[in-house]
Image: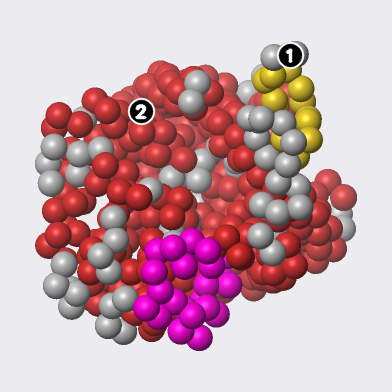
């Protein structure tokens, strides 16, 4: 039966706008540093091949599932799952999975805004020449000074949340679409500028070798890392792709569109590595220092190479834009749901949710300074404590929210969405939305949704919990 539903929130002008939106959601801080770093550590070209296999078997089937559920439901993720479940004769409680993803997205946004705010501070610092000639020790002290200052963190956290809310409040066409038409080309241009500059450092081939030297002996070491990153990098599991799919034109090919998003996401990550590691080597820094040192290693590298002040500023603008395109996708599912449920204006709903995320984010701000002694989930000799001040071990507020979202809510959300598409929605509905011409291709993709991807997510889930 044909699906003629239309979203009350509006729709993308074309499938390319969806590609920009979904790529913007997927491309974030992890693409700029974590993926290139993992590629170098886990065998270079061998890891890239393994990652692409995992993207094809796990990441893309889940992204296909979210997109087709969204387009078929034409509502917020919660209401799409509820209405489609009822249409399929299943329990409306499937909507709880989307509700869980929506809450997870808001929690991620609460701390993502704080971390993204660091890039705003570094744009100013780089532009003023603060890192020119800086040593690793002084760069570490500078970063420590930033996260140790709650007032400074609050300023940038507030500004970033305002930027995110501003885009969402303006709506699908005037806000999301218009901003993404600017931000995504800007992101690609900034990345290409950095790549072009890396050719002039004299260390481009060194960076290329670090990324792509084929080391098959490390393949097995990186299997879980590749599978985990293939799941997390596409921004699945929280409903962001689902709500973007609900704005997707009916005639657009979901398969071709999702494939394009996956390719662009991977190309951005690899290009970031080719752009940044030659700069790291040129600055005399160690790329193996880890993904958590974006705000120490790179400032030192930029501070000690020619034109580093300009290129460093470009880099942190790139980081901010990547974070911004991801953050708006985290807020949109909840805004769409509450607009549908309450009938209130998008501006009011956005303001309330942005304020809520801002308040929760203040816990992350304080995690690095005045609440640094506040520990959650403490296992001590006298038993387990949910909260304890000044305890040995345990997690601070930031780590606790990160653990809850990335290791529990996201995998459970992704698992629920792909199981719903594969086992509840119905073969005919899935075939109609995907509209593959080849029956063999459809059968393969449907099998990946029903069997392979769920198993992959379960493996990621167990692996993340046992870390």
Say which of 284 and 366 sits in front. Answer: 284
Say which of 365 and 110 sits in front. Answer: 365
Q: Return the mark for residue 115.
A: none
Q: Magenta residues?
A: 116-142
Q: How many marks?
A: 2
Q: Residues within 10 Å of mark 1 (few under 14, many from 20)?
A: few
Instruction: Please determine whether, in this image, residue 313 is positioned above or below residue 154.
Output: below
Q: Position of residue 23 (x, y in %)?
A: 44, 56
Which residue is drawn at the image coordinates 20% and 31% (left, top)? 218
Q: Is 106 placed left or right of 339 in the picture? A: left
Q: Secondary structure at mark 2?
A: helix
Decide whether residue 117 is among the magenta residues: yes
Marks 2/1: CA–CA distance: 32 Å
- Counting residues from the N terminus, which is met first, the one under dot 2 or under dot 1? 2
Residue that badge 1 annotates: 383
Q: Is 16 placed left or right of 384 in the picture? A: left
Q: Secondary structure at mark 1?
A: strand
Q: Position of residue 227 (x, y in %)?
A: 36, 32
Q: Is 274 placed left or right of 142 in the picture? A: left
Which residue is drawn at the image coordinates 57% and 44% (left, top)? 242
Say which of 158 and 419 sits in front. Answer: 158
Residue 93 can be seen in this image? yes
- Location of residue 335 by image quarter: bottom right
Which residue is drawn at the image coordinates 62% and 40% (left, top)? 399
Residue that badge 2 annotates: 224
Q: Is 179 placed left or right of 205 in the picture? A: right
- Location of residue 283 by image quarter: bottom left
Decide whether residue 246 is among the magenta residues: no
- Indicate the colouring scheme: secondary structure
Instruction: Please determine whether, in this image, residue 136 is positioned above or below residue 128.
Output: above
Q: Residues within 10 Å of mark 2 (few under 14, many from 20)?
A: some
Q: Position of residue 284 (x, y in %)?
A: 25, 65
């Amino acid at each position: 039966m044909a699906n003629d539903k239309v979203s009350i929130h509006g729709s993308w002008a074309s499938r390319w706008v969806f590609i920009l939106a979904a790529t913007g959601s997927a491309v974030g801080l992890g693409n700029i540093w974590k993926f290139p770093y993992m590629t170098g550590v886990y065998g270079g070209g061998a890891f890239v091949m393994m990652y692409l296999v995992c993207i094809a078997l796990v990441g893309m089937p889940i992204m296909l599932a979210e997109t087709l559920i969204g387009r078929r439901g034409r509502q917020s993720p919660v209401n799409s799952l509820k209405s489609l479940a009822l249409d399929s004769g299943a329990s409306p409680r499937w909507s709880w999975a989307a509700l869980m993803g929506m809450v997870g997205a808001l929690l991620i946004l609460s701390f993502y805004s704080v971390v993204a705010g660091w890039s705003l501070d570094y744009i100013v610092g780089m532009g003023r020449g603060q890192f020119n000639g800086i040593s690793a020790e002084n760069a570490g002290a500078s970063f420590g000074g930033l996260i140790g200052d709650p007032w400074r963190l609050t300023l940038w956290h507030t500004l970033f949340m305002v930027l995110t809310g501003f885009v969402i409040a303006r709506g699908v066409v005037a806000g999301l679409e218009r901003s993404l038409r600017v931000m995504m080309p800007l992101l690609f241009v900034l990345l290409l500028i950095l790549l072009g500059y890396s050719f002039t450092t004299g260390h481009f081939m060194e960076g290329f070798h670090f990324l792509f030297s084929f080391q098959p002996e490390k393949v097995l070491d990186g299997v879980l890392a590749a599978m985990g990153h293939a799941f997390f990098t596409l921004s699945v599991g929280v409903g962001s792709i689902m709500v973007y799919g609900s704005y997707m034109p009916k005639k657009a090919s979901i398969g071709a569109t999702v494939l394009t998003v996956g390719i662009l996401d991977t190309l951005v990550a690899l290009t970031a590595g080719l752009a940044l590691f030659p700069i790291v080597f040129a600055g005399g820094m160690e790329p193996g220092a880890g993904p958590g040192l974006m705000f120490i290693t790179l400032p030192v590298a930029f501070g000690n190479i020619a034109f580093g002040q300009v290129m460093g500023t470009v880099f942190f603008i790139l980081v901010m834009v990547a974070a911004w395109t991801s953050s708006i996708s985290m807020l949109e599912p909840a805004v769409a749901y509450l607009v549908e449920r309450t009938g209130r204006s998008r501006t009011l709903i956005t303001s309330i949710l942005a304020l809520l995320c801002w308040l929760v984010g203040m816990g992350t701000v304080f995690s690095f300074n005045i609440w640094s002694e506040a520990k959650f989930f403490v296992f001590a000799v006298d038993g387990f404590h949910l909260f304890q001040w000044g305890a040995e071990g345990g997690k601070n507020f930031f780590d606790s929210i990160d653990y809850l979202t990335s290791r529990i809510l996201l995998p459970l959300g992704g698992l629920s969405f792909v199981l719903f598409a594969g086992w509840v929605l119905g073969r005919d509905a899935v075939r109609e939305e995907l509209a593959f011409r080849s029956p063999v291709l459809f059968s393969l993709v449907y099998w990946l949704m029903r069997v392979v991807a769920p198993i992959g997510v379960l493996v990621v889930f167990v692996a993340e919990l046992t870390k």
